[in-house]
Amino acid sequence: MEDSVFLTLTQNVLILILILSTPVLAVSMVVGLIISIFQAVTQIQEATLTFVPKIIAGILTMIILLPWMLNIFIDRTVEMFEYVQTMIK
């Protein structure tokens, strides 16, 4: 396998990881920001207060977006296998 093929596949995998992880990370970040604002307003300085809501929000986001994420994953995986197949010939 040539270096350019390996680099292209690695780049595609990293882009796929970014695409699939962005919604969950964005929702977790927004929930964390809201909880931080709540903590600042109420002066509750509990460090563990943000973990449970962020985990719940991340799980709910994954449940809601799982069909979309699965479609993206399957499409990109098929594209990568087709790319490798054309490079082998």
Image (spheres, helix red, strand yellow):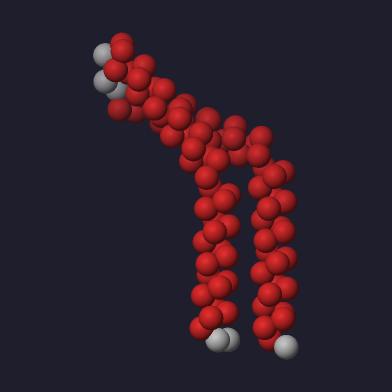
Q: In this rendering, would 18 be left or right of 87? A: left
Q: Is residue 85 above or below residue 41?
A: below
Q: Residue at x 73, y 88 (%)?
A: 89
Q: Residue at x 61, y 39 (%)?
A: 62
Count the labels in the image.
0
Q: Residue at x 52, y 67 (%)?
A: 11
The image quarter containing residue 16 is bottom right
Q: Position of residue 79 (x, y in %)?
A: 70, 67
* Nearer to the camera, 3 or 44: 3
Quadrant of the snapshot with the N terminus: bottom right
Q: Is residue 78 above or below residue 56?
A: below
* Nearer to the camera, 56 or 26: 26
Q: Residue at x 31, y 13 (%)?
A: 41
Q: Position of residue 52 (x, y in %)?
A: 45, 28
Q: Is residue 24 above or below residue 86?
A: above
Q: In this rendering, would 17 be left or right of 31? A: right
Q: Is residue 22 above or below residue 13?
A: above
* Nearer to the camera, 86 or 45: 86
Q: Residue furthest top?
A: 42
Q: Position of residue 50 (x, y in %)?
A: 39, 27
